[in-house]
Image (tube, coloured by chain):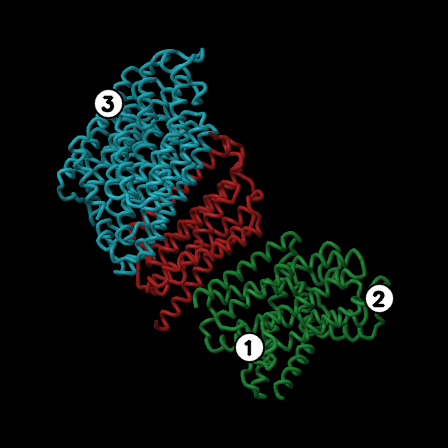
Chain colours: A green, B cyan, C red
Amino acid sequence: MTGYLLEIGQALLALLLAPGLVGFIRMVKSRLQGRRGAPPWQPYYDLRKLFGKEAVVSRNASWLFRFAPYLIFATTVAVTMLVPLVAAPLPFDAVGDLLMVVYLMLLGTFFLALAGLDPGTAFGGMGASREMTVAAIAEPTIALAIFGLAVGAGSTNLGQIVAQTLSHPGAVINPGHLLGFAALFIVTLAETGRLPVDNPATHLELTMIHEAMTLEYSGRYLALIEWAAGLKLLVFFSLLANLFLPWGVATALTPGGLAVAVIALVAKLAALGLAVALIETRVAKLRLFRVPELLGVSFVLALLSVTSSFLLR
Amino acid sequence: MKFLLLLLPPLISALVAYVVRPYRAVVGWLNALLSLLSLGAALAFAGHAARGAEAPVFGPGELLRADGLSALLMVCVAAASTLTLFLSPGVGTETDYAQTQLRRYQLLINLFIFSMLSAVSANNVAIMWVALEATTIFSALLIPLTRDKSSVEASWKYILIGSVGIALAFAGTVLGYFDFVALTGRAENALNWPVLLRNAPAMHPEVMKLAFVFLLVGYGTKAGIAPMHTWKPDAYGEAPPALAALMSSALFAVAMYAILRWKVVADAAIKDHYADNLLLTLGLLSLAIAAFSVAQSRNYKRMLAYSSVEHTGLICFGLGLGAAGVFAALLHLVNHTAAKSLMFVLAGDIERKYGSSAIKQARGLLTVAPWTGGLFAAGLLALVGLPPFGMFISEFALFRAGFAQHHLWVRGLMAAALLLLLVAFVSFITRLNRMLYGEAPAEVVAGETASWRVAPMLFGILALVALGLTLPAPLKNLLDQIVRIVSR
Amino acid sequence: MNSNDAIFAQLATLGSSLVLLFGIALLWRRSLVAYVRAFRWQSLALALVFALIGYFGHNRELYIVAVILVVLKVIIIPGYLSRLYERVGGKREAQPYVNVATSLIIAGLLVSLSYSITRPLAPVSKLPTRNGIPLAVGLILVGVFVIISRRKALSQIVGFLVLENGIALLAALGTYGIPLIVELGVFLDALMGFLVMQILVYQIKDTFESIDVEQLSRLRH
């Protein structure tokens, strides 16, 4: 019973923190750019505003257009219940492991791309094709990068991976570990639509990928998609943080342990958010045909990580 | 003491060439005479080894050692060097090269000879490697003596491919040392060949297999074993003739020497026929590629280069066929050194006369320059393996060793080799005919390049005939000693 | 294996991975400046690995080797290379024979191949550094691949230098370095080889007006 409560609590925590994370990154970026910027809780206000607005749907859109945001939101929330955010192992681990997480996220991406194509606008189609280019290389890399860790843990169960790293702290400077981290970091930037792959603040035709697909959405649909995007960012960050540097994750379901875990999670998210904001300020967006090269690098890093973990057992 | 007599003359020659500017003809003569000293020392070593005496050593940590195999190679290298130095540009005849080019030539070629001699007298396989790398460097600087597009291109390909090959050979050396270290810990003289050989039976076969592959590919690139032979036609075609002569005869021999040294160690460690099979396969590949390339060649210098690849293949065969095969291969190496060095010098003379190295252009050789043409024909017939020249005997011994093997597939390989030799034979003879007979182009001046040059080359041909008619006892003793060293 | 050895092994493997990654960076970047910079960082990482092995392996000679490495391959040779490409020109590698994404995947495959080739080596050695050996062999293979797939003579030179770094790494990891006298000879040879290549590149530029090796294709049959 406590397990299921924990799962729901974890999902709620993620839902709560996600817009804050997005706002935090935006704030850091604006401070770095010399602006005052909006406060970190601005996205909460945005969400509330969007939920209140009327959703305008194009006449050419089909049922998919209305269905997709719910699906995307649902899959992302499901993923938050499978990822070790504050505790490991989780009761849902038996149902969902690494591969399930990857598939769920890919399902969301797929439907988002379809929804971009659905209204028949030029921007939507363009965004969908670009997104698929990125996802084609990024998705296998996620699996490979974490698989490198899974080999060491002997299972693709995320909770078990965390437990393995906690019991062998020396493995952190393992090259397989570090290579996997580097690969997953690059993929995070790609999948969550951050520079240098995609600019989350732009609506210029030349540069947008994620924004292009969601251009037609408004009202509650847009709110759900934005929230799901924030959740995805949170999930990726917590994967990076808790799989590779799992200290702070509660292994026993005690209130003290959970409190520590929550604080640790917030700290790690802030650190990663800071890093991403710094990178976004420093780096220019890559031209689109160069993105596969960057993703190719991350793929090779992930491949090396798996090879070295596999053959150095 | 003998070691100093062997190694110092080329160094002194290089120093003289460096110091004397502008270049004077006396430098060339001096260098040629000094090389006779090296030749003398080499022959002394050979005689010493042929008698079966203990190998002399020299230097700290037994740096230099001259056992039978080293002595044979020393003689080959020194003899080829002497011949080439006497027939170099700027020695006695008028030449097309400028003073600065001649000075650079004398400096670099003597450094080249020094590094080759060091390679065969070094006891330490790593020093041998250093010397071989040095040969790559010096020859690469010497190939573009005249800075035109073709020679620069040839030199670039040569140094790139050669350096990669040498680097891989070093990786192989490191892997061999790796095994030794894993067994007995680090030791200062661990890379001395006798020490390696002594510890070889205890080494891990798998590691030595990997090491030998690297070594074969690496040193094989220097030797010109297919498929790493692609630099040969370019480099030999574009280098100054004397350098091409030395590279094709002496440098090739030194590279095969390096492979043989490591093969002995590898065989002792691996204990089955892994190395032999590798050599047989690559030998057949070289032979095949050479035979079909000769059939397409339109340039007589490149044709000679492909002939080199063909003989590389034959020698690889020999090395892979056990004791009798090694005997034949080494005899073949001696013959090949004599013949190839001659041929390239002659090719250089022909090119100077006709102004082109295309076979189409070099017609009517016998009418234009009968002695040169005759010597060229004799040399080519020798290379093709006809009696009464020495190559016939060594090839015969090779095939006899091959057909005496038990495995059927080896005999099949030898039969295939015979067929390929036939293909090459036909191509060579047709091209030779085209060159010897016919109308000479109008602008070619009749007459020899220089009459006295014929004498040393005639001597070389006579040596080949002598080797073809009989196997002199000292040489046979030396070869027997070497086979004893090599087939432990 | 005591904990000191364990830390040594981890650090050595980490250092070797860094060296390999800088080598793979050659396949990713396109500009000649980036190549030289990657080589510089790689040589620095390699020198650190040498120093590390010298420290843990109680071998003073390796410190000397590390210093020579830094002087030669971090300062002198990249300096020459930069001067060379300034004079000879061409800021970017022309489209290489194999495009970037494919090159990267091939690099990954080459490293996997090197792991399988060096399987027999692992049980042989008792040294803590043996886990890095596949990485060194992988770097050798990547170096050869860079030479084959690049179009400009300068890029081929950098590929060759990376190949040599790979072999040095192999020597360090597998045997704690070869005897000093030999190491010195090897360095000398490397320097001279590089100088000769440099001379030849100047000659290529003079005679061909470009360093695109596509032009070097006159010699046939």
Q: Residue at x 33, y 29 (%)?
A: B245
What is the distance, in whole Å, between disc 1 and disc 3 at their CAs? Answer: 85 Å
Crowding near pointer 3: few (<14 within 10 Å), some, many (20+)? Answer: few
Position of residue B83 relative to residue C37, above or below, is above
Q: Are marks 1 and 2 on the same chain?
A: yes
Q: Are marks 1 and 3 in contact (CB under 8 Å)?
A: no
Q: Which residue is mark 1?
A: A159
Question: Does residue B133 sit above or below B91 in this rendering?
Answer: below
Residue highlighted by disc 3: B462
Q: Which quadrant holds the N terminus of chain B?
A: top left
Instruction: Bin the neighbour count of mark 1 within 10 Å (Cα to Cα): few under 14, some 14-19, many 20 and up.
Output: many
* Residue at disc 3, secondary structure: helix
N-term-proximal mark, 1 vs 2: 2
* Callout 2 secondary element: loop
Seen from the viewer's position, the closer of residues A57 and C45 is A57
**In-front residue for pair B18/A83:** A83
Q: Amino acid at mark 2?
A: Val
**What is the chain letter for disc 3?**
B
